Image: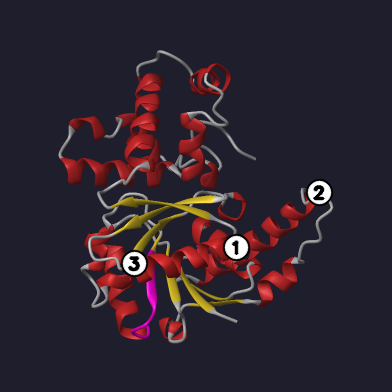
């Protein structure tokens, strides 16, 4: 089986690892924290069981079978045979810089690095490596196993061979990729974060309650989720980090983070992952 490395065992990393395993790949899931790896194992187990409830008669693998193809660890040397490494760590430059310095040291020269980032420039990340032609952005959507399309980002040096190999891997995972060029935020987050940020301003200015804001977009525009529900799903800390990157990158006031969002993050109200954000979750 093809060996694929996954860096970061948070919600996105766990979803990517699950999707890869269900596609028949051997996965090495790396995270610095043992507790996070344990949590990722539990999340994958629960996600596979949840999928089985909505399989409409399709015979799905058991969680035990899916987990059997995922090796959990914190040693980057485990990645020495990986043909791809998919990085999913937090949207902070210093953290990503450390990760790519380690990957460059431990991974074989042929390995392709896929950056699961929502805002940081792929060209900037590629500059940390000696293989810029083999670095490409792949912005997975949450929840990863249930989403059929990804935003793929071509860096300045990304080669056509890298693009084609990445398309093959994504197709194996059951995903279509829409390829865009590289500038911070790309298409999805450059637009969606303006949407979520302005929705937070509407709440801060006491124009409407979160439920009413989201209802307008669900019921009037037919959106599956409102902007504040979406922010809670992504994680308000991630939204704030992304807005800060966009503001720094473009020096444009339209990306100025809503003070309410920052205040909620300081208070630990991060959305679904903390149990409370604009809404309360069980």
Is residue 111 one of those drawn in magenta? yes
**Vertical arrangement, residue 74 with respect to residue 270, above or below:** below
What element does badge 3 sit on?
helix
Residue 62 seen anywhere in this rendered image of the structure: yes
Instruction: Name the residue that disc number 3 marks.
Output: 160
Mark 1 → mark 2, Cα distance in angstroms: 19 Å
Residue drawn at x 35%, y 42% is: 187
Among the two numbered marks 3 and 1 on one chain, the one whose residue lies closer to the N terminus:
1
| Quarter of the figure with residue 91 | bottom left
**Quick check: can you spot residue 86?**
no
Q: Which residue is mark 1?
A: 19
Residue at 48% of width from left, 20% of height from top?
213
**Disc 2 element:** loop
Mark 3 to mark 2 CA distance (whole Å): 38 Å
- Rendered view: 35 above or below 82: above
Residue 170 position in % (x across, y down): 52, 62
Q: Which residues are magenta?
A: 107-114
């Amino acid at each position: 089986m093809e060996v694929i490395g996954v860096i970061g065992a948070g919600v996105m990393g766990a979803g990517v690892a699950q999707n890869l395993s269900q596609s028949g790949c051997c996965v090495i899931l790396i995270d610095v924290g043992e507790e996070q790896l344990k949590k990722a194992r539990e999340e994958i187990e629960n996600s596979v069981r949840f999928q089985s409830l909505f399989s409409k008669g399709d015979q799905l693998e058991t969680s035990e079978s899916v987990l059997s193809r995922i090796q959990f660890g914190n040693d980057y040397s485990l990645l020495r045979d990986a043909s791809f490494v998919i990085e999913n760590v937090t949207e902070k430059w210093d953290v990503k810089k450390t990760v790519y310095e380690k990957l460059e040291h431990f991974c074989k020269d042929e390995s392709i690095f896929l950056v699961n980032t929502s805002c940081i420039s792929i060209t900037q990340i590629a500059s940390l490596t000696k293989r810029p032609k083999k670095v490409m952005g792949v912005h997975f959507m949450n929840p990863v196993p249930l989403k059929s399309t990804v935003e793929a980002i071509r860096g300045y040096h990304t080669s056509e061979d890298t693009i084609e190999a990445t398309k093959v891997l994504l197709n194996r995972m059951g995903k279509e990729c829409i390829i865009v060029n590289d500038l911070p935020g790309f298409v999805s987050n450059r637009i969606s974060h303006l949407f979520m940020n302005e929705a937070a301003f509407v709440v801060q200015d006491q124009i409407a309650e979160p439920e009413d804001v989201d209802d307008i977009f669900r019921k009037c525009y037919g959106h599956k989720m409102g902007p504040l529900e979406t922010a809670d799903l992504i994680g308000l800390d991630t939204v704030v980090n992304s807005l800060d990157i966009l503001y720094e990158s473009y020096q444009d006031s339209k990306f100025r983070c809503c003070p309410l969002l920052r205040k909620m993050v300081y208070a630990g109200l991060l959305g679904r992952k903390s149990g409370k954000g604009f809404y309360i979750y069980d």
